[in-house]
Image (cartoon, grey):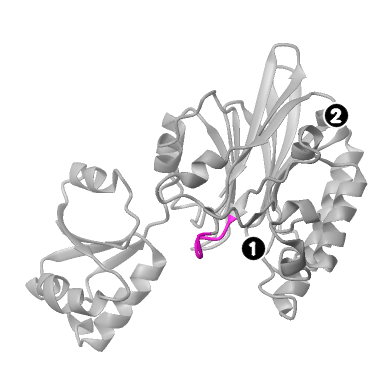
Amino acid sequence: MKLLYIRGQEVSCDLKKRLSDENFNIQEVILYRTIAKRHLTNRCKNLLLDGGVGSVVFFSTQTARVFCSLVAKSGLSSMTSNVVAYSMSKNIADSLKSIKWKSVIDVILLQETKCTEEQFPYLEIKELKYEHAIYGQTARNGVCILSKYPIVKNFQIDIVEDYHEARYIECIVKYNDHHVRLGSVYVPNGQSPDSHMFEYKLRFLDKLGQRMNNLLKNEELTIVAGDYNVAPDEIDVFDSSLLNDEICFHIKEREKLRAIFNLGFTDAFRIFNPNLQQFSWWHYQGNSLRNNQGMRIDYILLSPQAIDRLEACYIYDGLRKLENPSDHAPIICIIRPAKAFIEQAMSFD
C-alpha cells in the first residue's frame, strides 16, 4: 500500500522504519504551516492525484488540521475520500530511549503526554521493561506512570469532576512486601488571572488538596509529583517583581499550593536545596534558557513516610539543553523505602 507520510518539524526517529517493516511504500512530504500551500500544490497534490494513496499519517494534530484545511481549499476533497488520517503523538518511547541515564530510573511520572490510550506505545514501553498506568486524552493533557516494579492498582481520577480532563493518575507499586503510592499530576496553566481557566485552576488546586489530604490519612509512603504550574516563593522565579500576580506566580494560586504543603506534604527539592535558585521550566522563546529566565513549577511532594527515607533530590536541567527538548527539566529523587530497596521517582513533560 502506498502511504503518504506528512510531518512537521519533529520527526519520530523510528516511525519510517516501522512503517517500512509493515510493507508500506512511503512517500514523505514535509508540511510546515508557513509553506504548506506550496507543498500541497506540488508534491502532495501530485501524490493525491495519483490515486494510489491508501493512508495519510500525520505526526501531529496541528499538521493534520493544516493539511485538511488546505485540501478543502484546493478542491481535492473528492479525491481524498478513501484517505484515512492518523494522528501521531510525540513518540514517548523514543524520548525515553534517547536519554542516557547515569543510573537506572525505577519509576517515571509523565505529564502532558498528549496521546490517547490507543496511541500509547505499549509494546515499546514493555521493551524498556516498564509496567504502565496511563490516563490519556486526544492531543492534550495526559498523565502516565511507568514502573519497573509491579503496579497492583491504578486509578484514573478527574480532580474536578465536571472537567473530564486527563490530569491525574494514581497507582500502587509493590516491591516484595512494600507498597508505594504514586500520583502523577498536571495542574492547569490557568491562561491568565482574568480568565475563567484561572478559576478552574484554583478549583483544581483545592480539589487536589482534598485528594492529597485523604492520601495522608492512609499513612502510606506516598509520592505525588508533576507539573504544578505554580512557583511558590520568590526564589522560584527569575524576577519576582516582574512576575508578581502573573500566571503561575499569582498570590491566589501560591496560597492554594501553600495549603497543600501545609497538609503535611514536603517539597523534596527544598529539603536539600533550601536557598538554591534553580528552575524547572523555561519558555521556548526569547532566549529564556540562555538567560536563565525560568520558574520552578515542577515538584516531587512526599508524605512524612517518604520524607523519612529521602536520600537525594535534584533538577536535571541538562535534558533541557538537548535538541528538541521539553520546556521542562526532569526532577529526580532517590528514596529508600526499606533496606536494599531504592525507588527512584522522576517527573517530566
Q: Is residue 210 visible?
A: no
> Which region is colored magenta?
282-287
Tell me which residue sits at (57%, 27%) in the image: 148
Q: Earlier in the sequence, mark 1 or mark 2?
A: 1
In the image, 256 versus 289, the foreground residue is 289
> Dot 2, how many residues are within 10 Å of its Cα: few (below 14), some (14-19), or many (20+)?
some
Instruction: Identify the residue shown where x is 18% and y is 45%.
Output: 20
Marker disc for residue 305: 2
Circle 1 is placed at which residue position? Answer: 165
Q: Using the rendered image of the protein, determine whether residue 186 is visible from the camera's viewpoint.
A: yes
Residue 76 locus on image (x, y percent): 19, 83
Q: Hey, what amino acid is under mark 2? A: Gln
Residue occupying the point 14% across, 76% down: 45
Q: Give the image location of residue 102, x and y in percent.
A: 51, 25
> Which residue extends farthest left?
50
Helix, strand or loop under label 1: loop
Q: Main secondary structure of the magenta part?
A: loop
Residue found at the far front of this picture: 291
- The N terminus is located in which quarter? bottom left
Q: Secondary structure at mark 2?
A: helix
- Along the viewing direction, whichever of 219 and 315 lies nearer the viewer: 315
